[in-house]
C-alpha cells in the first residue's frame, strides 16, 4: 500500500487553508498548513513533504517566489500554484497552475503521479 502524501499548503485565506487541509486529511493524506511564504520556508525541509501547494497572492513574498526558492534548493519537489486569476501564465519555478475553483480529486491524482515519477527517477 502506498504511503500517504505529505503536503505543505500555503494560503493567507483561512477558509481555503482549512478546506484544503481537511480535504487532504479526508483522503488519508497529511497536510501542514501555513499562512505565509516566510512560514513555509521555515517549515520546509528536504524529504519532509511530497509537494507544496501555494496561493499566488500572499502578503509579503508571493507564491511564485516561494516556488522559485524551493525549486532552486530542491528541484524535484512539485510546486502547485493556485490562483483566482484565470489569465495567469505558468511562472518559472512552478510545475502546475490551478485556477480556482478546481477539482480536488484531479489534484490528488496529479500529486500521486508526481510522487511515483520522482520515486522512479530516484531508483
Image (cartoon, grey):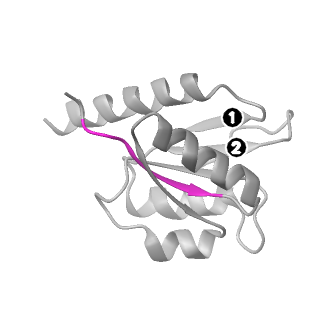
Residue 72 at what x, y percent from top left? 45, 60
On the rendered structure, is 68 left or right of 1? right
Tell me, yes or no, whether the highlighted magenta stretch contains residue 21: no
Q: How many marks?
A: 2
| Image height of 117 relative to 63, above or below | above
- Taking depth in this image into account, of 103 and 87 the one nearest to the observer is 103
Q: Earlier in the sequence, mark 1 or mark 2?
A: 2
Residue 41 at what x, y percent from top left? 50, 72
Residues in magenta, as a range: 3-10
Does residue 93 appear anywhere in the picture? no
Prevailing SS of the magenta stretch:
strand
Residue 21 at what x, y percent from top left? 56, 49
The image quadrant that residue 35 belongs to is bottom right
On the rendered structure, is 76 left or right of 102? left
Does residue 95 appear anywhere in the picture? yes
Q: Residue at x 61, y 45 (%)?
A: 20
Tell me, yes or no, whether the highlighted magenta stretch contains residue 4: yes
Mark 2 = which residue? 82
Mark 1 = which residue? 98
| Image height of 90 relative to 64, above or below | above
- Taking depth in this image into account, of 51 and 76 the one nearest to the observer is 51
Disc 2: CA contacts within 10 A as few (<14), some (14-19) or many (>=20)? many
- Taking depth in this image into account, of 48 and 86 the one nearest to the observer is 48
On the rendered structure, is 77 left or right of 16? left
* Residue 119: image tag: none
Check the picture and name the quadrant holding the C terminus. Answer: top left
The reply to whether the C-beta atoms of the residues labelled 1 and 2 are less than 8 Å apart is yes
Q: CA distance from mark 1 to mark 2?
A: 5 Å
Check the picture and name the quadrant holding the N terminus. Answer: top left
Q: Residue at x 36, y 42 (%)?
A: 5
Label 2: state its secondary structure.
Answer: strand
Amino acid at each position: 500500500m502506498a504511503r500517504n502524501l505529505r503536503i505543505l499548503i500555503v494560503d493567507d485565506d483561512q477558509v481555503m487553508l482549512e478546506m484544503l487541509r481537511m480535504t487532504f486529511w479526508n483522503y488519508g493524506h497529511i497536510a501542514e498548513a501555513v499562512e505565509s511564504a516566510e512560514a513555509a520556508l521555515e517549515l520546509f525541509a528536504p524529504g519532509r513533504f511530497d509537494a507544496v501547494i501555494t496561493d499566488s497572492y500572499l502578503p509579503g513574498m508571493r507564491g511564485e517566489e516561494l516556488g522559485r526558492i524551493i525549486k532552486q534548493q530542491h528541484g524535484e519537489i512539485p510546486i502547485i500554484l493556485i490562483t483566482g486569476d484565470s489569465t495567469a501564465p505558468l511562472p518559472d519555478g512552478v510545475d502546475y497552475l490551478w485556477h480556482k475553483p478546481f477539482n480536488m480529486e484531479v489534484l490528488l491524482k496529479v500529486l500521486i503521479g508526481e510522487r511515483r515519477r520522482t520515486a522512479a527517477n530516484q531508483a
